[in-house]
Amino acid sequence: MQFPKNEPVTDRPLVVLLPAAMEQSPRTDVADALRGREFVSGILRAHGYVPAPLDITPEILQFPERIQHIVRTTKTRCVFNIFEGFGCDSASEHQFRSLVEEMSIPCTGNPSGVLQTCLSKETCSQTLRKAGIPVPEGVSLHPGFDPELLASLRLPVFVKPLMEDGSVGIDASSLVQEKSALLRTVLEKLSLFPRGVRAEEFIPGREYSVACIGNGPYNVLGVSVIDYENTEGTNFLDYDSKWDPASPLYSLVPQRAEGAFREKAAQLAAAAGQALGCRGYFRVDMRERHGILYVLDVNPNPDITPDGGFLRQCREAGFSDEQTVHTILELAFEEEEGGTTRE
């Protein structure tokens, strides 16, 4: 493994800052970011880099000069962005990235504007729709909404938080099969997530997940598929299926997609990334109905843990974990220099 091509090799080891949220939370997805940081730090250290962990707290974000001081004193040359926001404040993810951009330091992953767009299910859907990318019909709802807004949606309807990621707020009640239960479900979700919920027509077919890497054009590293016809539990992945070992779907391993739909999914994911302006690496989730793929979600900051879906798909494409981490780091330097991904 070598230094990124745009960074001159010197006798001084290259310091890579690794920010991650430090907060008291019982949620498994919050602790997962710390696992990702340890994993990436180990790879960087083994290849001659100096990983510098940075614990991000709500307090430190209020004083950007503290972060700037840490960057200066550690002589940081790049930020490997593990920070995914706080459990109670997902918007802090793009706010932190904005601080890094102001310091003009190479940073892995997507810029703040993309993180902000993808956090809002409404804004992301609108952006994709304008680009001609199929997305489910849906409405965004806030406290005090007009119930008539739900009348245009065809059952079944899927209800999820408007401004969350990691499947937070998604459970068995999210899929509404009967009209009489729709308003009640929306009100219950709004009581838990007052920043808004998104109600969308449910796409019942196979679910595809596409891992992409690059600053454009993108390299599609893996396409996975889940066919729920032969699975126990819900016919979608909820929060517990991703984070709770007791969930019937926790042990479900997506299969490698093959054939025409693999190519369709790969092309659609790349188009979605281009429409949103994605950089570095990202994942796109979609489902199929009547032969058409619909983009459900774009994750602009997928977790980098050894048992996570993104690295699993990279391995299936022949990338070792070391190669993936190095490529992500290299892309940060290429983006800072205004370059593009090498073919």
Image: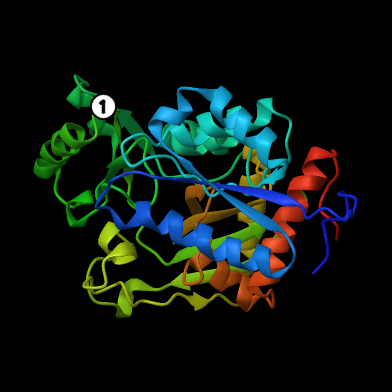
Crowding around mark 1 (Cα neighbors within 10 Å: few <14, some 14 to 19, many 20+) is few
Whole-percent x and y of residue 304?
53, 60
**How many numbered discs, if any?**
1
Say which of 101 and 41 sits in front.
41
Amino acid type at mark 1:
Leu
Where residue 263 appears, as percent x and y from the top left, is 65, 67
Residue identified by numbered label 1: 149
Q: Give above or below for 76 relative to 322.
A: above
Image quarter hosting the N terminus:
bottom right
Measured as percent of width and height from the top left, residue 289 is found at 43, 59
Q: Toward which corner of the image does residue 139 lie, by quadrant?
A: top left
Q: Quadrant of residue 246?
A: bottom left
Check the image and report above or below for 20 versus 61. below
Is 198 left, or right, of 3 in this rendering?
left
Residue 115 appearing in the image: yes
Q: Residue at x 67, y 63 (%)?
A: 44
Which residue is depicted at the point 14% across and 35% down? 183
